[in-house]
Image (cartoon, rainbow, N blue to C red):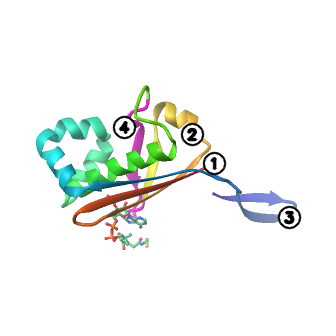
Amino acid sequence: MLKQVQQDDFIIIKREVKMIIGIGVDVVEFQRMKTLLEKWNDIFLNKILTQKEIEYCVAKKNIVQHVAARFAAKEAVAKALSIGWSGSFRWKDVEITNDDSGKPSVVLHQELQKILSSKNIFLSLSHSESTIVAFVVIEG
Ligand SMILES: CC(C)(COP(=O)(O)OP(=O)(O)OC[C@H]1O[C@@H](n2cnc3c(N)ncnc32)[C@H](O)[C@@H]1OP(=O)(O)O)[C@@H](O)C(=O)NCCC(=O)NCCS
């Protein structure tokens, strides 16, 4: 994170020194996600994605790729945190948003938001016809 620091008459731009505390990667097969969506459709979407994420995906030509990317991103966040999908940890507590340029970010909710409020989470997504990849770095 870049930080502006006022010191005497100078404004210094500093990058806070933070450590990488976790990385996570996940790969999803396009065909596997397509089969899941054909079988479960709304049930699956509503279990895994927030309303905003669903709106983002259904507005795209290739819905399956974007759903798979969000699924992979959530799995990658879980790996980076070294925690499993159990207890109070829920799919929708990890939300993927995109800025105007398309760049994705992770927005946390509920307990995760409280626990990780001081951490920076970086996410990169990529899709090919057959494969979707998410890579996450957590800095704190
Ligand atoms: C970023 C970009 C190169 C990706 O193109 P691509 O190779 O066709 O896409 P991929 O399948 O590898 O990746 C798609 C994912 O890239 C991510 N992405 C899109 N725009 C992005 C951006 N500006 N910065 C970072 N990631 C971006 C998204 O997460 C997207 O998946 P999603 O829509 O499901 O969230 C392309 O969208 C682009 O040229 N954007 C405009 C230029 C730009 O802003 N470039 C900056 C990054 S080089």
Please name the amino acid that badge 4 sits on: Trp
Which of marks 2 and 3 precedes in the sequence?
3
Left or right placement of residue 24 versus residue 118 in this view: left
Which of marks 2 and 4 precedes in the sequence?
4
Q: For the N terminus, which image quadrant?
A: bottom right
User: Rounded to the nearest whole Å, what is the CA distance between mark 1 and mark 4?
Assistant: 22 Å
Please name the amino acid that badge 3 sits on: Asp
Residue 105 forms part of the magenta stretch: no
Q: Find disc 2 in the rendering and name its residue.
A: 116
Q: Nearer the viewer, residue 20 or 120?
A: 20
Q: Find disc 1 in the rendering and name its residue.
A: 140
Q: Find disc 4 in the rendering and name its residue.
A: 91
Q: Position of residue 125 (x, y in %)?
A: 38, 60
Q: Identify the secondary structure beneath mark 3.
A: loop
Q: Judge the density around disc 1: few (<14), some (14-19), many (≥20) Cα neighbours within 10 Å.
A: some
When asked about the image quadrant of residue 9, the answer is bottom right
Answer whether labels 4 and 2 touch (C-beta < 8 Å).
Answer: no
The image's mark for residue 9 is: 3
Q: Identify the secondary structure beneath mark 4.
A: helix
Can residue 56 be seen at all in this image of the molecule?
yes
Q: Judge the density around disc 2: few (<14), some (14-19), many (≥20) Cα neighbours within 10 Å.
A: some
Q: Residue furthest top?
A: 87
Q: Nearer the viewer, residue 9 or 24?
A: 24
Answer whether labels 1 and 2 touch (C-beta < 8 Å).
Answer: yes
Please name the amino acid that badge 2 sits on: Leu
The number of callouts visible is 4
Viewer-nearest of discs 4 and 3? 4
